[in-house]
Image (spheres, rainbow, N blue to C red):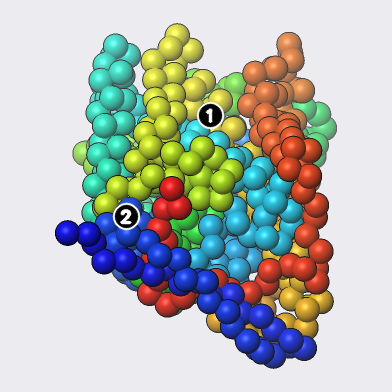
Amino acid sequence: MSASPEYDIEKKASHNEGSAASASADVVVHDADAGHMHRSLKGRQVSMIAIAGTIGTGLFLGSGKALANGGPVGALIGYGAVGCLVGLMMYSLGEMMVWDPSAGGFIEFSARYVDPAMGFAMGWQFWFQTAMTAPVEVVAASIVISFWDKNDAHKPIYITVMLIGIILVNLAGIKYFGEFEFVFAAIKIVTVLGLIVMCLVIDLGGGPDKDRRGFRYWRDEPFNNDFFGVVPASKARFLGFWAVLTQAAFSYGGMEGLAMICLEASNPRVTMKTAVRAIFYRIVGLYVLAILLIGMCISRSQPALLQANAEGSGTAAQSPFVIIIQTAGIKVLSHIINAVVLTSAFSSGNEFLYSSSRALFMLAQQGQAPRVFAKVLKNGVPIYALGLCSCFACLGYLACGKAGANDAFNWLANITTLGSMITWWGIAVSHIRWYRGMKAQGLSREMLPFTSWTQPAGAWIVMVSFSVIVFFSGFQAFMTKPFDFQSFISNYINIPLVLILYFAYKAVRKTKIVRLMEMDCGTHYVEDSVVYSKY
């Protein structure tokens, strides 16, 4: 028996002189048995993923490098500044995403509001960014495991187990993926809150060592006065603070991935609105408070800090939280925290593998990637897209090379950090163009289901700020002797990649920047609709 057809209806509203005049509907017949995205993510799952999705190795491990580079005050200011910028970016994305949750996230927004060539470049850049971040988390997990097992010969085994785990979770489908991430997100949030309380107790002298630290390290070394041996001290302090900005960007990286779950979230306008509103205050608040207390409990010159500067000689297996626990004389707890950090790395790797596979699916849907990657199983998994992204996750085996996990972690982290900032810049540009398009067409912002008081100024601030940060992100490569060409390449490789993608697509397809009056500012979302694979 043949299955009855289902209809995927997308409505595009047209407006005349600021009021809704008419609505046209395009009806596309699909086979009911055809693969499509499942809107199985519940509101509680989306909110939890939004809050805890970016809490990972950037906070648990990478914050040690930020403290070493900038000092307690420099690290706090750096994380606070980047956190505010990312929050403004999320409000920009939130307005567009809640207005049209049926679109292909910021990949489609870039094409509709700026230039189809930009959508192509932003989509492939984001795919590259997330495809590289999954192995970063796998490498971070191998670093954490070395806290217990220092035999490097065992690393391939641990990495293999991690890779198989995240692939199986993604293969299970969005329903099980959501439940898995909900549980692990809850663990991460409870852990961070517990660590914040623990650091406060230790700082006030409640630890076994009875050492009341107070603001001792803020008085002794608030900034890094000898960053790379630079003189005078004022210049060293500024450069140390600037180095924190890119580290903070790595920690916050992944927030924009919230747009990837629009196609699989139930009642997306409500759930996305709630998630965007919560993500800024809760995530930035948790990060900033955690960085504040880390800087109060541990010295920036502590040799055991993860990936410390040249003066550091500690092991890569220790996060600043573990070091605080050990220096305070607390037993056993360091093992528990390290175990949680391990689950956090696994969860983050799982989410980035999901984001990269969905980005590739969206590109294929728009005809900007081989159509095979739009093939979807009955459980809603884009199987071929997931398969290719899983192959890139195998870059985690770089940690098994002679250079070790540290170099692999640093190299991949630099690539993904720059990719995140370029994506944030692209989101801001798309919002600016969308805002101008609506204004030119006489469309009122009052019709939007979600607005932020920060716009449009917020999008401009994000665009300008990340333009500057991206341009100077690899400055440390020029300070080493001899010149660190590997660091330079990893810090800037995304820029020529985006430019090549943009101009190559523009040359081949003869695309033009979308005119404001011709811009598609309407919404294509139909309540309770699902997205079918076009191929």
Q: Residue at x 32, y 59 (%)?
A: 31
Residue nearer the viewer, 192 or 449: 449
Q: Which mark is residue 412?
A: 1
Q: Is residue 516 visible?
A: yes
Image height check: is 130 above or below 15?
A: above
Is residue 226 in view? no
Residue 292 located left or right of residue 513: left
Residue in the picture at 45% in, 9% down: 402
Q: Quadrant of residue 486?
A: top right
SS category of the residue bearing label 1: helix
Q: Position of residue 63 (x, y in %)?
A: 51, 42
In the drawing, does residue 453 fall left or right of residue 12? right
Corner quadrant of residue 12: bottom right
Q: Quadrant of residue 230?
A: top right
Task: Please state which of residues 207 and 32 is positioned toward the viewer in this rendering.
Answer: 32
Foreground: 386 or 457?
Answer: 386
Q: Please state the horizontal and vertical placement of residue 449, each as a whole percent of the image.
A: 55, 81
Other residues around mark 2 within 10 Å, as few (<14) / some (14–19) / many (≥20): some
Q: Quadrant of the N terminus?
A: bottom left
Q: Position of residue 273 (x, y in %)?
A: 49, 74
Of tags 2 and 1, the one toward the viewer is: 2
| Labelled disc at residue 34 | 2
Q: Look at 56% across and 46% down and name the residue there.
A: 367
Q: Amino acid at mark 1?
A: Leu
Residue 445 position, x and y percent, is 68, 82
Name the element at disc 2.
Answer: loop
Q: 190 above or below 158?
A: below
